[in-house]
Image: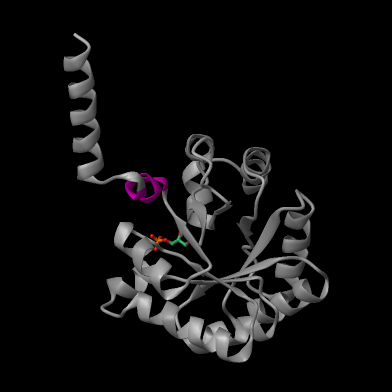
Amino acid sequence: MEIFLDTGMVDEIREAAKWGVIDGVTTNPSLIAKTGRTQEDVIKEICDIVDGPISAEVIATDTEGMIKEGAELAKIHKNVVIKLPLTEDGIAACKWFSDNGIKTNVTLCFSVNQAFLAAKNGATYISPFIGRLDDIGHSGMDLIEEIRTVYDNYGFTTKILAASIRHSSHVREALLVGADVGTMPINVVKGLFKHPLTANGLEQFLADHAKANS
Ligand code: G3P
């Protein structure tokens, strides 16, 4: 499973990029708003840090506007992926981008039927929001599993990008059900490294080494 960092904060991206485990970055209008910068500036800088897919979301809600905006975003860098909402207009725009060889990430997916429509129109990525489904008492991971089954049954090549990941257990479960990508905040990536037995074991090794060499 590829790991994407879900943030617009370039300092976080620089920090995580050093670990060598980050394959790409996703942003959304809320994350860009937190930076206080323009989307174009943020995306340009991210593209200089990470050599992988970088999702930038359109604000327009009509197909024509999405195409215009997305085509401009795609000019920023070859790695830019156009993020489109899962609406009738967004799915229509997805078809246009697919037909024109531009990668897409269809976002705000909450059902297998929505994921089916995105795949039909050639989406590069589908983003089911796990955490937000869990928040309302549904199972985000069941949705990932259902989409995996449908995409495998019909041979769809759209990649399942598990989004709205909130903690390490989401990552573990996404790995087990076969998500292609997980996008997560930096605190979740940091959590993947951690295990108390690793920390305790290392402390003991270093203490024993120091004792033997004192
Ligand atoms: O990639 C989508 C993600 O940013 C949404 O996460 O935590 O706002 O539900 P969250």
Quadrant observed for ligand 1 in the rendered image: bottom left
In this rendering, is residue 58 above or below 152? above
Can residue 167 be seen here? no
Horizontal placement of 183 versus 120: left or right? left
The magenta stretch is: 186-192
Q: Position of residue 33 (x, y in %)?
A: 50, 49
Find the residue positioned furthest to the top.
214
Residue drawn at (74%, 79%), measured in percent from left and top? 95
Q: Which residue is at the front of the view, 132 or 199?
A: 199
Report the magenta stretch's main SS.
Answer: helix
158 drawn magenta? no
Q: Position of residue 152 (x, y in %)?
A: 56, 85
Find the residue positioned furthest to the front.
212
In this rendering, is residue 177 above or below 206? below
Q: Which residue is at the front of the view, 82 or 123?
A: 123
Quadrant for the C terminus in the image: top left
Q: Position of residue 197 (x, y in %)?
A: 20, 44
* Picture colour scheme: one colour
Q: Quadrant of residue 61?
A: bottom right
Q: Quadrant of residue 140?
A: bottom left
Total numbered badges shown on the rendered structure: 0
Can residue 45 be seen here? yes
Q: Position of residue 1 (x, y in %)?
A: 51, 62
Q: Which residue is at the front of the view, 61 or 212?
A: 212
Residue drawn at (61%, 57%), measured in percent from left and top? 55
Residue drawn at (16%, 16%), measured in percent from left and top? 211
